[in-house]
Image (cartoon, grey):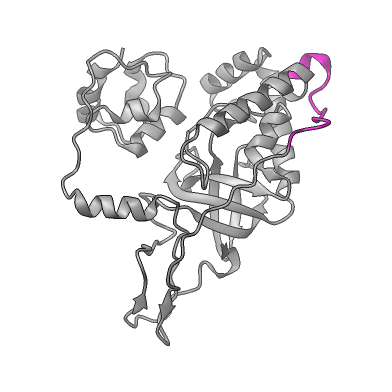
């Protein structure tokens, strides 16, 4: 794991870098396109910011400030700045819009309490967009009690809904989504958090929650990165189990595979998965993530409002949606 305090030293020297590495790519944490490997940031600290909420918050990583957004879960908004999304969240919990804002504020306070001690962030630096001018990245966040997203859902302060990704060391997201659904069902049955607003149980917490996940990255034996004297420090991500397999596959298959064809008018803009969206020509993981984050849409015509979709791209992709 990589201590946050050592992640962002100032690069004062311009000397050539000579580092001996075995199949582990060098990654700049500021890379906008994201990393295929998990970057693990330890001893992170919450930065108090009015824009923080239950599932999105500012954190200090050494001397650098970042904005992270949780994978797989969605806490209600804390204000009425995005009314369409707020209405959809209120409908999900079967409560009013003002009550949804109360749940969002309770989720914000819950997250603030959980992150009052140093925490660990697992991220691939994938763009999560957002209203802030600051770049926001998707992440799994681990507190001393386990995964933060699971804790929010189990206490009725977030729903099992959001941008999907397989947690560190897992092959896919299915098992984690099923676990989140179980936590959501239990919170609903106990009428706590957003599920208990009408019963005066907004601030009631789960009494005997199941253990929350503690994610780790699996390491494979490899040579240590050994920089020469006076060389500038860089950051190497911890490889996922499939890293070496993926690397050899890329070497064997030099030509990219063509996208699977999809019929026109088939895609439902509000329910399509990331995989389905990426089947559409000219839609990659970044745009797919932005579409998912901007839901719900009234019609597919609202695609024009998604960042990165101009008139030309809209004309190319609109026919694939219902």
Q: Is any part of residue 76 visible from this angle?
A: no
Q: Residue at (58%, 30%) from the top-left corner?
A: 74
Q: Give the farthest residue toward the bottom.
A: 229
Could you tell me residue 265's position as x and y percent? 26, 13
Could you tell me residue 197's position as x and y percent? 77, 18
In-image side of 34 versus 316 (left or right):
right
Say which of 102 and 191 sits in front: 191
Q: Residue at (50%, 59%) from the top-left corner?
A: 219
Q: Residue at (60%, 25%) from the top-left corner?
A: 80
Residue 8 vs 137, above or below: the answer is below
| Magenta stretch: helix, strand or loop mostly | loop
Q: Residue at (50%, 50%) from the top-left corner?
A: 123
Q: Is any part of residue 255 visible from this angle?
A: yes
Say which of 225 and 153 sits in front: 225
Could you tell me residue 278's position as x and y percent? 31, 31
Could you tell me residue 132's position as x and y percent? 50, 42
Residue 266 vs 60, above or below: the answer is above
In-image side of 26 versus 178 (left or right):
left
For the N terminus, which image quadrant? bottom right
Q: Give the farthest residue toward the left.
A: 255
For the C terminus, which image quadrant? top left
In-image side of 43 versus 133 (left or right):
right
In-image side of 253 versus 98 (left or right):
left
Number of marks in the rendered image: 0
Residue 200 vs 140, above or below: the answer is above
Is residue 50 one of those drawn in magenta? Answer: no
Please identify the quarter of the rendering in which residue 75 is found: top right
Q: What residue span does the magenta drawing correspond to?
A: 195-210
Residue 202 vs 45, above or below: the answer is above
Please identify the quarter of the rendering in which residue 224 is found: bottom left
């Amino acid at each position: 794991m990589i201590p946050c305090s050592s992640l962002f030293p100032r690069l004062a020297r311009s000397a050539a870098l000579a580092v001996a590495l075995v199949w582990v790519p060098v990654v700049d944490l500021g890379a906008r396109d994201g990393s295929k490997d998990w970057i693990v940031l330890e001893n992170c600290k919450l930065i108090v910011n009015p824009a923080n909420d239950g599932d999105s918050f500012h954190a200090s990583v050494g001397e650098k400030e970042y904005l992270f957004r949780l994978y797989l879960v969605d806490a209600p908004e804390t204000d009425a700045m995005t009314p369409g999304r707020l209405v959809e969240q209120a409908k999900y919990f079967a409560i009013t819009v003002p009550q949804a804002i109360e749940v969002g504020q309770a989720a914000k306070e819950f997250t603030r309490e959980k992150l009052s001690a140093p925490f660990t962030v697992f991220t691939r630096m994938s763009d999560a967009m957002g209203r802030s001018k600051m770049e926001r990245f998707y992440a799994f966040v681990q507190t001393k009690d386990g995964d933060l997203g699971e804790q929010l859902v189990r206490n009725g302060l977030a729903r099992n809904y959001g941008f999907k990704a397989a947690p560190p060391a897992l092959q896919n997201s299915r098992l984690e989504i099923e676990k989140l659904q179980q936590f959501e069902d239990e919170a609903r049955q106990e009428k706590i958090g957003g599920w208990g607003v009408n019963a005066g149980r907004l601030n009631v917490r789960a009494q005997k929650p199941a253990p929350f996940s503690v994610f780790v990255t699996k390491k494979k034996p490899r040579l240590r990165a050994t920089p020469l004297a006076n060389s500038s420090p860089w950051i190497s991500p911890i490889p996922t189990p499939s890293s070496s397999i993926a690397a050899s596959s890329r070497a064997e298959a030099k030509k990219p595979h063509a996208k699977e064809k999809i019929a026109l008018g088939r895609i439902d803009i509000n329910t399509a998965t990331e995989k389905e969206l990426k089947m559409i020509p000219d839609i990659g993981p970044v745009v797919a993530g932005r579409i998912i984050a901007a839901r719900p849409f009234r019609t597919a015509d609202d695609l024009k409002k998604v960042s990165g979709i101009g008139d030309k791209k809209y004309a190319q992709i609109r026919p694939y949606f219902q």
